[in-house]
Amino acid sequence: MAMTGQEIRKKFLEYFAEHGHEIVSSSSLVPHDDPTLLFTNAGMNQFKDTFLGRETRSYTRATTSQKVVRAGGKHNDLENVGVTSRHHTFFEMLGNFSFGDYFKEDAIKFGWEFLTKVVGLPAEKMFVSVYNDDEEAAQIWRDVIGLDAKDIEYRGEKDNFWAMGDTGPCGPCSEIHIDQGEHTGCQSPDCDRNCECDRHLELWNLVFMQYNRSEDGTLTPLPKPSIDTGMGLERVASVVQGVTSNYDTDLFLPIIKYIADLAGKKYGDSEKDNVSMRVIADHSRAATFLIGDGVLPANDGRGYVLRRIMRRAMRHGRMLGLEGAFFYKVCGFVVDFMKGHYIELADKKPYIAKVVTNEEQSFSRTLNTGLKIIDELLEKNKDSKTISGEDIFKMYDTFGFPVDLLADIAEDNGYVLDNAGFEQEMHTQQERAKKSWSGSGEQRVADVYIKLASTLKSEFVGYEELEAESEVA
Ligand code: ATP
Ligand code: MG
Ligand code: MG
Ligand code: MG
């Protein structure tokens, strides 16, 4: 019997505890006192000040299983969910940390030993990457671990220089990958180790924390070279359990089965339904944990990301034929399924259900009116695959349909939105409003209208900003 996800997590923490690491609990998804971060996006976040030397702890080695959300901000995987088998919005990141204690050689030895000895992954299928000029790391992989030169890839800043955000601790890194073989089904004739498909799976990132990046981009050396590593539990589980998708591991299948049962369908029967089930499964974990950590759906900031995640899940529920509120049930299932390790969820089940139900009710009204009209809109534009600014404006102005949601639906169907045209429409409308009311003694009404129009617009800009961030990531 292959190790379960729970067992892998336990073995990981135990292995590092045996090697002198303090087992530290996951921190909240809402970063404590760090305005540079939208959500906790890596295990190292809670140790940021320790790396920077601003805080000392009673230990110099730590290990965690950290709750992480990568939706919005520098590391944004929202659009990957449903598309790849390896990206989630919420996932568990296993990590080991050294605060000025061991450095590259031990980090590499620990990582390799854990994967090949404790977990028993086949060394011959694995390869690593190092940062372009990090000959030291390459030499350790070659001479200390004994890897073939052909299994050491040199990569640039994008893959092998890790940074938490635009500022903060950072450094060159070395990643451990596994080739899962041809059966992962990549169709690209050029599929190689750099392919964006799921075949050459990145398992673990060992970051050699050496610098602090300040706002103007300068790198200052940290007080002491340190280690920060991160490995996605769901990814190791997929390899250990011999499946090629995180969704086929025991960490996800029960959630997917629960969703399939609700919809009266079977996972695996239709690819379109499979995607919806995976999106709902992923998003239910994110929503449950975010609400559990105190985030509420809102029109900006963290709450806005949560709202988008929830609404996307609810929309996929519709696509599966689930009428009425269902998402709160899935989130309830997630609480029961995951509260064994994340005990903070246990007594929050009724609260989470209430928050989700409220959102589900208000969203259902929006969806009922909007979806039919959007279908017509897509049909009308099926040749150009573009939604004009005029139509976006009409959806917004006449039907009150959120533009971000329209964008989600359009993009899911392969359409693009003419955002510039939409801005233009907003502007024209404002001008028209000004003109028609000026001098008629109804100035106050005009003001109200203009204010309303610009509020709508600023909501829209909020969405645009989020998209811009996701392009940077
Ligand atoms: P990728 O290149 O696959 O997007 P990454 O290089 O962005 O991953 P890191 O920032 O290095 O990821 O994070 C450390 C580890 O966390 C990765 O090696 C991977 O195992 C896991 N991981 C990263 N992003 C996700 C995600 N969205 N869902 C699940 N696991 C993830
Ligand atoms: Mg990534
Ligand atoms: Mg990577
Ligand atoms: Mg990485």
Image: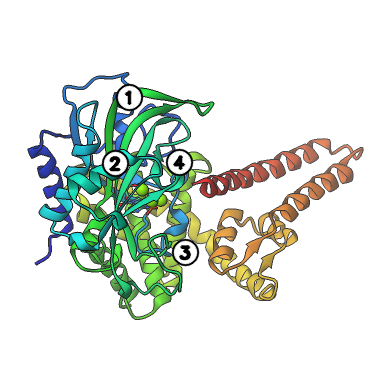
How many dots with numbers?
4
Pick the residue in front: 136 or 111: 136
* Tag 3: amino acid: Arg
**Mark 3 — residue?**
315
Q: Nearer the viewer, residue 19 or 270?
A: 19
Secondary structure under tag 3 reads helix
Q: Residue at x 83, y 36 (%)?
A: 443
| Residue under pointer 1 | 49
The quarter of the image holding the N terminus is bottom left
The mark lying in front, picked from 3 and 2, is 2
Q: Position of residue 159 (x, y in %)?
A: 41, 48
Location of residue 459 by image quarter: top right
Query: What is the x, y in percent for residue 247?
Result: 30, 65
Residue 112 in the figure: left or right of residue 371: left
Tag 1 secondary structure: helix
Q: Which mark is residue 137?
A: 2
Q: Which tag, 3 or 2, sits closer to the chain's start?
A: 2
Q: Residue at x 45, y 54 (%)?
A: 78
How dense is the environment of label 4, judged by Cα within 10 Å: few (below 14), some, or many (20 and up)? some
Gap between marks 1 and 2 measured at Cα: 25 Å
